[in-house]
Amino acid sequence: MAEFELNASFPEERTAREAQRKLQALRITSVTAGEDGMSFSACVEDGVIERAAHLIRETGGTANWH
């Protein structure tokens, strides 16, 4: 499977932490928190990209994919 890098940002630290926990429930373990506490990056396999994108939007964040 191919992997894509996700960079996500959120308006609050609380929502960023919530999204990180939910991504881990999708078995995405390579999550790296940003220094500001309101962003993170992760490597996401193509099989769960749609679910990860929905999760980010659902928790109030925005995502950029590379």
Image: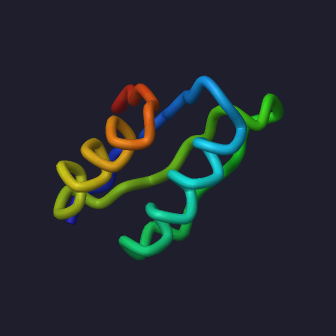
Left or right: residue 36 versus residue 44 is right
Quadrant location, the N terminus: bottom left
Residue 31 quadrant = bottom right
Display coloring: rainbow
Percent position (x, y) of residue 51? Answer: 23, 55
Q: Quadrant of the C terminus?
A: top left
- Residue 63 sits above or below residue 13 on the image: above
Direction from residue 22 to residue 65 in the image, left or right:
left
Q: In the figure, is residue 12 to the left or right of 36?
A: left
Relative to 20, say whether 53 is above or below: above
The residue lying at 29 percent from left, 60 percent from top is 45
Q: Residue at x 43, y 42 (%)?
A: 59
The percent position of residue 34, horizontal first and vertical second, equals: 73, 37
On screen, residue 55 above or below 57: below
Instruction: State the count of labels.
Output: 0
Q: Residue at x 31, y 52 (%)?
A: 52
The residue lying at 71 percent from left, 38 percent from top is 13
- Provide residue 8's location: percent of width, then percent of height: 50, 33
Q: Position of residue 46 (x, y in %)?
A: 20, 56
Q: Nearer the viewer, residue 1 or 51?
A: 51
Residue sticking out furthest to the right = 35
User: Which quadrant of the structure image shows residue 63?
Assistant: top left
Where is residue 27, by image quadrant? Answer: bottom left
Q: Which residue occupies the foreground of this view, 56 or 48?
A: 56
